[in-house]
Amino acid sequence: MADLTPTRSLAMQLQDERRTMREGYAFLDEKCLLLAGEMLRELRAYQALVRELAPLQQAAHAALQGAIARHGLDGLQVYPAAPGRYALRIERRALLGTAMIDARLDGEPGAAPPAVFPSPEAEACRAAHARVAAQLVRIAAHSTNLARLYAEYRRTVRRVRALQDVLLPEVESALAQIETSLEELEQDEFGFLRRALRAAQSSL
């Protein structure tokens, strides 16, 4: 901090500033802990969904192979698609100002136009990939939450370090200098008054 004129009011101002910074530090430190805990919960949910995705993808791959074996690649490409009656449902929430979401895919496939060569293999392929898509929507929501939480965690950590390593030490140093200067001024004033009193007494 720049050189400051030592006064009692300035010392009180710096004491208030130090107290405010300490309260802010405690809040930000607690915020880091809450964000870290939420990141851990989101990560566990994400990992669980990814584990559930693997067998769904395997089933979809097997269903695709079965449909191709039945219709051939060209035949499967022209197999009539069911009109999607899906809706992406997003629920928004917040943790300490960090926007978070929960997402799911609602709805069912509509009735497809009749196929020239309908088959259970093609229908199974359609259903298996719909399950994969629904799972991916849920995974994407948790991935988004993790990215947002991590970004906010990093910002909060930077603020904590700035308070701990720069701002608080500066205020502490300035306050210590001012308090030392005030003590020296008080001692000088006391010495002056004592000398003046002695001089007055000796003149009597």
Image (cartoon, rainbow, N blue to C red):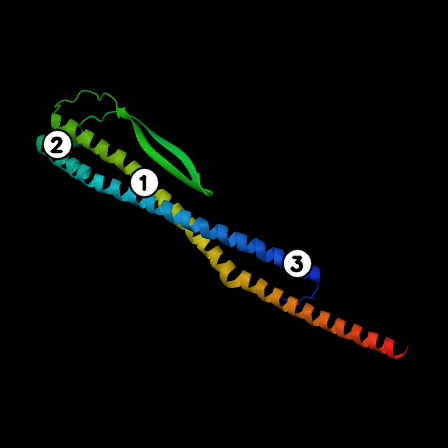
Q: Quadrant of residue 182?
A: bottom right
Q: Which mark is in front, 2 or 3?
A: 3
Quarter holding the C terminus is bottom right
Query: Which mark is drawn over residue 140?
Result: 1
Query: Which is nearer the eye, 125 or 190?
Result: 190
Q: Residues within 10 Å of mark 3 (few under 14, many from 20)?
A: few
Quarter of the figure with residue 183: bottom right
- What x and y, as percent, mark residue 187? 72, 72
Going by the numbered disc 3, the residue's amino acid type is Met
Q: Mark 1 touching mark 3, by CB under 8 A? A: no
Decide: is 152 above or below 5: above
Q: Position of residue 157 (x, y in %)?
A: 44, 55
Task: Tell me the distance, in whole angstroms, between the alpha carbons under discs 2 and 3.
Answer: 80 Å
Residue at 48% from the left image edge and 51% from the top image edge: 28
**Amino acid residing under circle 2:** Ala
Q: Amino acid at mark 1?
A: Ala
Q: Pick whichever, 122 or 26, lies toward us.
A: 26
* Residue 12, disc: 3
| Vertical placement of residue 186 versus 83, above or below | below
Q: Earlier in the sequence, mark 1 or mark 3?
A: 3
At label 1, counting other C-alpha atoms closer than 10 Å, the crowd grade (few under 14, some 14-19, many 20 or more) is: some
Q: Position of residue 116 (x, y in %)?
A: 14, 22
